[in-house]
Structures are given as structure tokens and as C-alpha cells.
Amino acid sequence: MGYTLNFNLIWRHFDKLWGGLLLSLELAVISIAIGIVIGLVLAVWYVSAGRVVRSIIAAYVEFIRNVPLILLVYLVFYGLPTVVDIAYSAPTSFVATLSLYSGAYLVEVFRSGLEAVPRGQLDAGKAIGLTPWQRLIHVRLPTMLRITLPALSNTFLSLFKDTSVASVISVPELTYGAQWINFNTFRIVEVYLVTTAMYLVTGYVLLFGLRLVERRFRAAR
Amino acid sequence: MLGQIIYALPFLAEGFAVTLWVSLLVVVLSLIAGVVLGVGLVYGPAPVRWAVRIFSDTIRGIPILVLIFFVYYGLPAVGIHLQSFWAAVLALTLFKTAQVVEYLRGAVGSIPKGQSEAAMAIGLTFRQRLAYVIFPQAFRRFLPPWINGVTDAVKGSALVSLLGITDLMQAINQVIGRTYEAMPLYILGALVYFAVNYALSLASRRLEQRFAFIRE
């Protein structure tokens, strides 16, 4: 033992951690926004589609859910550009990966949400003469979103933590900042203590905020 | 291209064996630790309950990657020297233990209080109550999410590649470094992980269906 904690160097380089945290949040927010679009479109498509489309969507969901995120990140960043003629920066590549990743989890969330919308509501919509499209926009989706809100905030929280994987392709988010300080100052224990605290505090603040939103929009029982 | 990949297959298989070995160790060790801590969380005195709660909420609140780096780089700094393999196993086990604690709490919590009270009324000791009344019933609630969570251990094990351990992920990266065949190798790796994890999630789903008809 005999390790003396000294946080001075951490505070000197704190901008690496703070900037990293902001970037982590940014990556998580953009990814879940795109993931929600992917999830919504595919879930609505899934419940009304035939067998072939269903199996394709299911294959996408199962593939993403059963492969490590780090492999997907490498695949998109290092693999894809070797076969397709596109170039993108590491952050863009990571956002693309995390969007596809969250999309797969959200298809499942939204699909079960759509199925949980009470039949009577849809019948009521039909009875007042709404078209199928109006029923979807004004009846099904709003109710479904209320039902799925808790699952949605959980997905967002785990995406926020998953952004740490972006460090493997040198995206300067929070974990990358922690590693930078680790390798450059060797105040190892201190930097990971501070980083842990930053992830925890941010996570719980987000959780608290999202729970407030959930309470505001809780599905009527 | 194909020839190079076939040439690399034995090397990749060795990496895959490391992936399976890490996952197995993590799953077994976390099961033991998680059940012990979980019982502490549900039945322990207040200080134990608090300690387990803080442990679990902290571990589940940070990325596994941070936990892995913390253990790997942090332990030598305070004078504890572990091989990188065991540091990785320790970090992943801590992470998985927190999950097992929550599965156990949920499973035990789902058993009606009357069961415990009835067991107390016929004079069973605490251990007998757990062994004959609570655990057999909680087991079927515990098993499906736990098996499903084994996929997290397999997926999480890919992060040990960052500590220079030659698991499947690292083996793939090394072969790509030699052959520059990035896409086929990443897809091959993805399919291997998929095969293992999909089998596990199917098993979990079947168990859930099998236990679904049992109702209190």
C-alpha cells in the first residue's frame, strides 16, 4: 500500500475530463435521437408487415444485441471503409454505430409498447372516424410513448455508459480523457476515482430528471 | 484472401477459447459472489444492506470499460500485482456480481411473504427457510434473466482485448494487422459471438416459457 492520494494533477487537466463528459453526453443524445427514429419506424413497420420483413427486422435486432459493442465499433470504423467508398471521422462513425445499436434495442421496446396499447382505444379511434394513419399518429403512438417512457430512459442511461467504448477509436470522450491523464500523469487511482464519480453523478442526475419527466407523462391507469 | 483467413483459423480458435474461459470464470465467480451478497442485501443487518446497495449501485452506474481500467491500472499503483488476465477477470466479475445481486433480489422479492412466515411458523431455521422454501421457488424467477445475462459476460469479455489479452477480439485485430482483411474477419468474429450469445438467449427464452405456467 502506502499510496498517497494527490489530486492536483487531476484538477490541472480537468478540462480533459469535463470536455470528455460533455462529448459523452452529446454522443449519447445524438445516438438515441437517431436510434428512436430507427426504432419507431421499424417497430411500426414490424407490427403491420408480412413474414419476410418481420424476419429481416428480427435478424437486425438479434444480430446487434448478440455481438459486443466494441466489435461493432471496430467493424464500422475500420472495416466498412475497406469495402465501401466512404470516409468519416471517428465521432461520426461512433454515432452511426451507437445509433444502429440503440435502434435495435428500441425496436423491441417500441414493438412491445405498441402491442400494449389497449384495443379499446384503437376501436374508439375507429368509431370517431379516424383514418388508420390518424389512429397511428393521434392514438397509438402517444399512448405507446407513455408506456415505453421508463424503458426509454433506461436505454438512454445505458447508452451514456456505452459511450465509453468510443475511447477505443480515440474519440476524446470521458473515458478517453481519463486514460490520457492516466498515461500522462500516472495519478491512476485519483483519475479513475474522479471519473467514476463523474459517471455516477451524471447518471443519477439524468435518472432523477428522467423520472420526473416520466411522472409528468405517466400513462393513465 | 480466403487462404489467409483459413491459415489464421487455429489462431482465432485459440482466442475464442480464451473468450470462453474468461466468460466461464466470470460467470461462475460472479454467481457465487452475487448470491452471497444478494442474500446479504435481502436479509442482512442494515450496515451489510447499505454496503451491498452502494457496491451494486456504484458498479452498475459506471461503464465496464472504466471498471476494467480502474482495476488493471489501479491495483498495481496501490501495490497489488495481478496478471492482466486475472485483473480482467476480477473487473468483469465485479461488474457481473452486481447484476447477479439484482437478479437475486428480484427473484427472492417475488416470493410472497406468507411463504417465509409459514416456514417460520413450522419452526424452520433461517438456513432451512432459504434452502427448502425460498430458494426453490425463487430459482425459476432467477434462472431466465441470469442465463440471458450470461450474454453480457461474453460480450463484456471482448473488452479484455484492450489489456492485451489475446481473446477472440484481440486475435481478430492481430490477424487483421497482418492480412489487412478487416471486413471479412470482423464479420467472422461477429458471427462467432452471435452464435454463442444467440444460443444463450434462446435457452433463456425457452426456460422462461417453461416456467411461465407456474403461478402462485
Image (tube, rainbow, N blue to C red):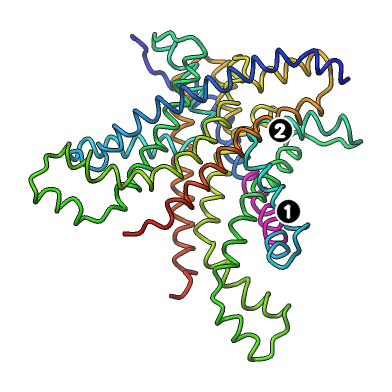
Q: Is residue B110 above or below residue A88?
A: below
Residue that badge 2 annotates: B191
**B137 or B15, nearer to the observer:** B137
**A206 or A101, nearer to the observer:** A101
Q: Chain of mark 2?
A: B
Q: Chain of mark 1?
A: A
Point out the image quarter for the C terminus of chain A. bottom left
Point out the image quarter for the N terminus of chain A. top left
Q: Residues within 10 Å of mark 1 (few under 14, many from 20)?
A: few
Q: Residues within 10 Å of mark 2 (few under 14, many from 20)?
A: some
Q: Is residue B199 above or below residue B212?
A: above
Q: Quadrant of residue B191?
A: top right
- Chief secondary structure of the magenta span? helix
Q: Is residue A183 magenta?
A: no
How many numbered discs, if any? 2
The boundaries of the magenta stretch are A26-41
**B179 or B139, nearer to the observer:** B139
- Give the residue drawn at x 22%, y 45%: B133
Residue that badge 1 annotates: A55
**Is B43 on the left-hand or right-hand side of B78?**
left
Q: Is residue A36 magenta?
A: yes
The reply to whether callout 2 and callout 1 are in contact (CB within 8 Å) is no
Where disc 1 sits, the SS reads helix
Q: Amino acid at mark 1?
A: Ser
Where disc 2 sits, the SS reads helix
Q: Amino acid at mark 2?
A: Leu
Horizontal and vertical percent for residue B203?
A: 53, 42
Horizontal and vertical percent for residue A111?
A: 62, 61
